[in-house]
Amino acid sequence: MSDRDILLERLERKLFEKEREVQELRKMLGGEIEKLKRQIIEEITEELRKVRDVEAKVVELSKAVDTLMNEVLYLKSEVRKDERSEREIIDIMKAEEEKKEPENPRKEDVIVAESKYDGPKYCEEDGDIIFCD
């Protein structure tokens, strides 16, 4: 063998070793890259779950607010109905009172005082009349 053949053989071995090292590095980096990808996917998945939870709570609160608003509007309309009916009753009562002009006082409006005067009392001794209240 010549020096040239020996040199070629050494270079071929070095090339083979370097190719093996490159393959090992690729495997190591590939594993690290896959590990990094999985980690990123897990983090994103967790964040998406949190976002979905928050969205569900927002929807629930929105429904609660809608329900409360409907209840408030219902109560407000009921109060207005009651106020209108009270006003109508008061207006009717005023109209009836205006129609009735009392010419003579009613018996319920007249207060009669009871008299304790029993009439004249005679005193038999003097024969005089005594008036007492």
Image: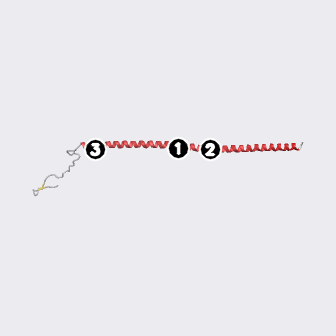
Q: In the rendering, at what x and y percent does residue 43 appear?
A: 63, 45
Distance from Cα at disc 1 to Cα at disc 2: 21 Å
Task: Name the residue at 87% across, 43% down.
Answer: 4
Check disc 3 and report its element: helix, strand or loop. helix
- In the rendered image, which residue does mark 3 sit on? 94
Horizontally, residue 46 falls left or right of residue 94, namely right
Q: Nearer the viewer, residue 129 or 25?
A: 25
Distance from Cα at disc 2 to Cα at disc 3: 74 Å
- Mark closer to the observer (1, 3): 1
| Amino acid type of the residue tagged 1 in the rendering | Val
| Amino acid type of the residue tagged 3 in the rendering | Lys
Q: Do callouts 2 and 3 mark residues in contact (Cβ within 8 Å)?
A: no
Question: Which of the 4 quarters of the picture holds residue 12?
Answer: top right
Position of residue 129 relative to residue 63, above or below, is below
Q: Earlier along the polypeptide chain: callout 1 or callout 2?
A: 2
Badge 2 density bin: few <14, some 14–19, many ≥20, Cα 10 Å: few
Task: Name the residue at 30% across, 43% down.
Answer: 91
Task: Name the residue at 75% across, 45% down.
Answer: 25
Position of residue 132 relative to residue 66, above or below, is below
Q: Earlier along the polypeptide chain: callout 2 or callout 3?
A: 2
- In the rendered image, which residue does mark 1 sit on? 58
- In the rendered image, which residue does mark 2 sit on? 44
Question: Which of the 4 quarters of the picture holds residue 14?
Answer: top right
Q: Which mark is residue 31?
A: none
| Amino acid type of the residue tagged 2 in the rendering | Ile
Badge 1 density bin: few <14, some 14–19, many ≥20, Cα 10 Å: few
Q: In the rendering, at what x and y percent does residue 31 appear?
A: 71, 43
Q: Earlier along the polypeptide chain: callout 1 or callout 3?
A: 1
Quadrant location of the N terminus? top right
Task: Name the residue at 31% across, 42% down.
Answer: 89
